[in-house]
Amino acid sequence: MAHDLAQNTVDGLMTGSAYAMLALGFTLIFGVMRRLNLSYGPSIMIGAYLGTLVHLQFGMGAAVVALVTVLGAVAAGFYVERLCFAPMRGQAATASMVASFAIWMQLEELATLLLPRHSYPFPALIARPPFEIAGILIRADRLLTLGAAIAAMLALWLLVHRSRFGLALRATARDRATARHLGIDVDRIGLIAFLGASALGGLAGMLVIAADQQITPMFGMWATFKGLVAMMLGGLGSIPGAVIGGLLLGVVEAHGQWFFGPQLRDLLVYALLFLCLVLRAGIGAGVPSAERRI
Amino acid sequence: MLTLAGIAKRFGGIEALTGIDLAVPAGSLLGLIGPNGSGKTTLLNVVSGFTAPDAGEVRIGATEVTGWPPHRIARLGVGRTLQHPRVFSRLTVLDNIRGDSRLSAGEAEALLDRFGLSAQRGRLGDELTIGELRRLDLARAVARDPRLLLLDEPAGGLTPSETSAMADLLSREVLPGRTGILIEHKMDLIAALCPCVVVLDFGRRIAEGAPSEVLRRPEVVEAYFGTEGADA
Amino acid sequence: MEPHLVGVLTNIGMIAFVALSAYLLLLVGEISFGQQAFFGIGAYAAGIGTAVLDLPLGLALAIGAIAAAIGQLALALPTFRLRGLYFAMASLAFAEMMRIVLELTQFQVERDGELVGPNGAEGFRGIRYIFERGIEPAEFLLLVAALLAATLALLAVLERSRFGRRLRMVGEDELLAALSGIDVFRTKLAMAAAAGALAGLGGGLYAHASTYIEPRLFDVMLGVHSLAYGLIGGLGTALGPLLGVGLDIGLLESTQMFAGYRMIVFGGLVAVLLIWRPRGLLDERLLHRLARIGRR
């Protein structure tokens, strides 16, 4: 029993680290733009499909596939930003969100036009059997994901809190109009944050798909959902919150799956999310409320 | 008519209001002045229900309204204008005035006429100049014929000639028969309209009296201009 | 009328109800990703009404609408004090919970030697009221159209009334609305009940038109489409969402135009449209201009 709990928790943390990376990307975009990019997962999926294409057509190995995946995600992110976010100013946050949903549909269809079968093989990054520490099975590629998530969190935190660019980013996030008056090119900041988030997402997606060793057209929705839920659990808009939210989601899912099976696991996750939202209490405490002042 | 007793409000570590007592007799207009950040707007928010005080009591007439939601206070006969006037940008000027009131279109048009907005009646709310916005905000506040009016810098951002037109409008159409509080940085307007002013500084009441006399007091001068320049 | 056309029009009519329900919430400023849940509740409740409890269709549809309205109120009560994104996410979480609950719901009874009723993820088969009574597809279309026309007429009257102004005030600026004496929370609750009922009515009709429903049908894709229809067609009038549904189902899905890459065309069109008109084709500004011309 205790062993199961420990194994589930470790498995959950491993899966959760991928969620955490997705949530970090969401947080970066949401923090700067105050808008939701529903096309986040599908953009990553386009990258992964391009990677798969390179793998299938030219027999490229894991390293090239990984690079193509990340670059493809960034390219798709650029397209989404230019079409759904850059041109929509002021109060049009809803329009951005719905437009990004429309582009989701577009990217999903594009992916199935590229590779029409239901699933394709994706090269593994580390193809060795799991090893054991204190009776707990650990997969090396999952451990790599956890390491990548921690590194991404630290790098992002340093970038946001310790660099000149980060200062401009925080200023933009806090008050766009004032930031613009201070001479900050807020549109450029938004684009860079968007592309950075896409690269991060591409990396996360690549790690997840490489660990599964296959890709399906469901991946886009999966990534958007998991990233969104993890961000919300973490309290919307804080970097450590996104990571904690992702890890928590992974652990809750692992235990839920073990004890109750897949349906009740999902029910449990959504109930937890709902409760967090209603109590307006994410774990990361989140951003100061953006309510309008009188 | 309006009585505040021991109103206190903290935001985080900042005491926005401390022990405010205030009484506005029926039919009079009280000037509320003080430097930026002294708590004037917060006090209006407490009266109109947007901010629940941590301590103290708000009475309008004989009714205690502490902690009531804004719409109930509005229905009790309280009109409020905003420091940064807002209008419903997707409604016409006429519908902005009619709003949720039972005014007929004819009555609303008569009201617009009194506030010099007849020509704008069919425009959408976001097509107005700042002067028109201020007048529309004011007209909206009196559309329900309130007993008590809370005016937050009605002449803010107006040119000198617009300001004197606003003073005329206030004394002709808005104030007769009503009780009110007026926040304003333009002291000419305060002096012209308010028999009595209260001065706030760092959330405390530091002076009260006739405008001409209060503004000469050293503590008021200091609050406004500061001995250490940063406070001004 | 050609059977294909009857099918398309019936589909447009039924989906229009759920699009209208998302539109009503958009009017009071709430973005819902969860209207599919109330469409689903209506479908299941009305289906149980005729297939399991042997009720007449009208009563079953009413039960579906009421059940969905209650469901939407249950969502709205704890969440309407949240704004914007928080509500959108809460509605999504709620809808996903409902879908999973439907997957777990077993409520079958024997009728004519056959098990009918919801059977978890397997779905709910045999909602055969229409066929058993020999109702022609064209007749059913007439019922859908009549209900939709009545709804639109009611909404048209509502929008011109004082209550309609109140809705748009709440949707644009809650604080200013409260200053005008409007009880923002109650106004939104009333809208939630109406939105739930409309989605439920559409769901009830859908269950009977297709005779078979399953939880998977009521997933987030349906919800986001419903939301998108209003934003494409326009938020200035209840005809906006209808236009959105018509464009998507009527023009793109049914005519096989751009077969194979329809979503690429549609998705791109929607994104470009929203740059040009963030509140849709028939937005408030256009309606205002039309009203002005009409007065002259």
Image (spheres, coloured by chain):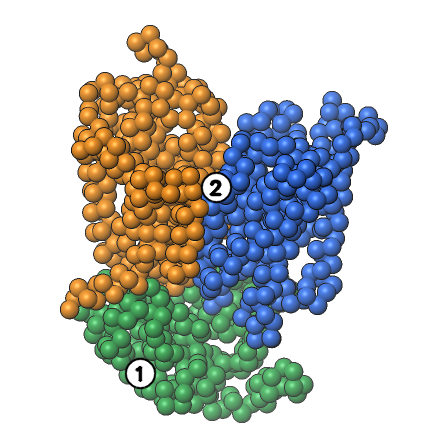
Relative side of A94 to A159, left or right: left
Q: Nearer the viewer, residue C263 or B148?
A: C263
x and y, in percent, of residue C155 in the image: 24, 49
Point 41% across, 87% down: residue: B159
What residue is shown with label 1? Answer: B169
The hue of chain A in the figure is blue
Q: Residue at x 63, y 82 (%)?
A: B231
Residue A261 rendering spot, x and y as whole percentages: 59, 24
Rendered view: C192 above or below A35? above
- Image hue for chain C: orange
Residue density around tag 1, few if under 14, some if 14–19, many if 20 or more, within 10 Å: some
Q: Chain of mark 1?
A: B
- Which residue position is annotated with label 2? A109
**Image point (15%, 69%), residue name:** C296
Q: Do discs 2 and 1 belong to a common subunit? A: no
Mark 1 is on which residue type? Leu
> Who is closer to the viewer here, B134 or A18?
A18
Above/below status of C154 relative to B156: above
Residue at the spot 30% in from the left edge and 56% down from the top edge: C282
How many numbered tags mark residues here? 2
Q: Is residue C295 left or right of residue C22?
A: left
C3 lies above or below B198: above
Indicate the amino acid at tag 2. Glu
Chain letter of mark 2 equals A
Separation (CA) of disc 2 from disc 1: 62 Å
User: Can residue A190 be seen by looking at this rendering?
Assistant: yes
Chain B, hue in figure: green
